[in-house]
Image: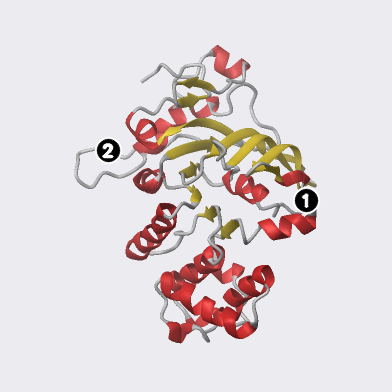
């Protein structure tokens, strides 16, 4: 078995807008081990979803993957033919999108949408595929009498579980979950996280995209922090939470409320940069209280201290 199921190497994704070129993902490298849960955390617009959709080759114009490699189970996905890639996506890589109301077809019954996975990839007949659809629906906590329902007849949490059912129907090796708990109440959110955890226990690797560092810390083996298209910190979840090295990660943790202690919530001053013209040096330096001259002039490289990696000139600052 290879050490890594997924390796993203020096990935560059740009959006060619009329107002300028947006550097959405700028030389990002990340790896996921078999059976591992890794969460990618950052503010909206930091590039985390763009990176995830690049794996599934779902970047469409004006976006373009301009450089890098995405190696999945020994195959470079960016150089795989469309015919071969269709066999991988859905069967070996599952994707759960942020809003199931837009990813599910509103005009088709949910049973037909799940059954299509089995019919397309395994060549099953419709009757057999529907039976498999019922099985996977019950696995995600949806009763079989919902098999004929349309998406609009279900709650937000139920729709998200249907989206997960489609993504995991063929027991993929990798599950990409793009903020699957957004707009759900905390009880349903916990149910969804338990569901994802159950698939991880069965050997599925999870790439979890979220802006919620506290949520990521609860379940992840490792956490990767992105800021302004760059990977700024990555390491085991407990190290990221207990000893964050990057000032941006420290700021994210300080913005998480503590219901049981006297901790005061602190916001990160300022706003993320315009990725059409990011600042020179460290992209976080206009918002960083530790920034020095080198931070304004030189772009930091990702350095590793054991398993804990950080891109910061002043990573020693506590």
Question: Does residue 134 appear left or right of residue 127 in this picture?
Answer: left
Q: Looking at the image, which residue is at 79% across and 56% down?
A: 82
Q: Which of the labelled discs sits on residue 169, or is there none?
A: none
Which label was assigned to residue 62? 1
Q: Is residue 48 above or below residue 288?
A: below
Please report the residue visible at 42 percent of the width from the left and 47 percent of the height from the top: 212
Q: Residues within 10 Å of mark 2 (few under 14, many from 20)?
A: few
Element at label 1:
loop
User: N-terminal of the two: label 1 or label 2?
Assistant: 1
Foreground: disc 1 or disc 2: 1
Residue 308 point in image, percent of width and height: 44, 26
Instruction: Return the residue nearer the eye: 292 or 58.
Output: 58
The residue depicted at 49 percent of the width and 79 percent of the height is 134
Of 99 and 18, nearer the camera is 99
Residue 276 rendering spot, x and y as whole percentages:
71, 37
* Helix, strand or loop status at disc 2: loop
Name the residue carrying label 2.
264
Residue 301 falls left or right of residue 220? right
Question: Which quarter of the rendered picture does the N terminus lie within?
Answer: top right
Q: Are marks 1 and 2 in contact (CB under 8 Å)?
A: no
Is the C terminus in the top left, top right, bottom left or bottom right quadrant? top left
As drawn, the residue found furthest toward the top would be 293
So how many labels did they put on this image? Answer: 2
Q: Depth check: give the residue in front, 103 or 3.
A: 3
Name which residue lies at 49% across and 52% down: 204
């Amino acid at each position: 078995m290879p050490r890594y199921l997924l390796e993203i190497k020096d990935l560059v994704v740009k959006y060619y807008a009329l107002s300028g070129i947006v550097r959405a993902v700028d030389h990002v490298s990340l790896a996921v081990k078999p059976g591992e849960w890794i969460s990618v955390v950052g503010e909206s617009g930091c590039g985390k979803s763009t990176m995830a959709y690049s794996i599934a080759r779902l970047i469409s114009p004006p976006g373009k993957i301009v450089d890098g490699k995405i190696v999945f189970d020994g195959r470079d996905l960016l150089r795989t033919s469309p015919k071969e890639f269709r066999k991988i996506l859905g069967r070996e890589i599952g994707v759960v999108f942020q809003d199931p109301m837009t990813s599910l077809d509103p005009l088709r019954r949910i049973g037909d949408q799940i059954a299509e996975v089995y019919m397309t990839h395994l060549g099953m007949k419709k009757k057999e595929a529907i039976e498999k659809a019922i099985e996977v629906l019950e696995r995600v906590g949806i009763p079989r009498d919902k098999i004929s329902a349309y998406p609009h007849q279900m709650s937000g949490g139920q729709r998200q579980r249907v989206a997960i059912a489609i993504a995991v129907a063929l027991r993929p090796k990798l599950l990409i979950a793009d903020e699957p708990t957004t707009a759900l109440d905390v009880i349903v959110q916990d149910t969804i996280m338990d569901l994802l955890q159950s698939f991880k226990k069965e050997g599925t690797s999870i790439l979890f995209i979220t802006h919620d560092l506290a949520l990521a810390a609860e379940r992840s083996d490792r956490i990767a922090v992105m800021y302004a298209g760059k990977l700024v910190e990555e390491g085991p979840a407990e190290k990221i939470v207990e000893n964050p090295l990057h000032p941006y990660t420290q700021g994210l943790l300080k913005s998480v409320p503590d219901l049981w202690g006297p901790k005061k919530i602190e916001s990160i001053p300022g706003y993320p940069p315009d990725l059409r013209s990011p600042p020179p040096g460290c992209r976080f330096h206009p918002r960083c209280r530790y920034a020095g001259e080198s931070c304004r002039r030189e772009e930091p490289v990702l350095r590793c201290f054991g398993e804990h990696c950080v891109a910061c000139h002043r990573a020693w600052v506590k």
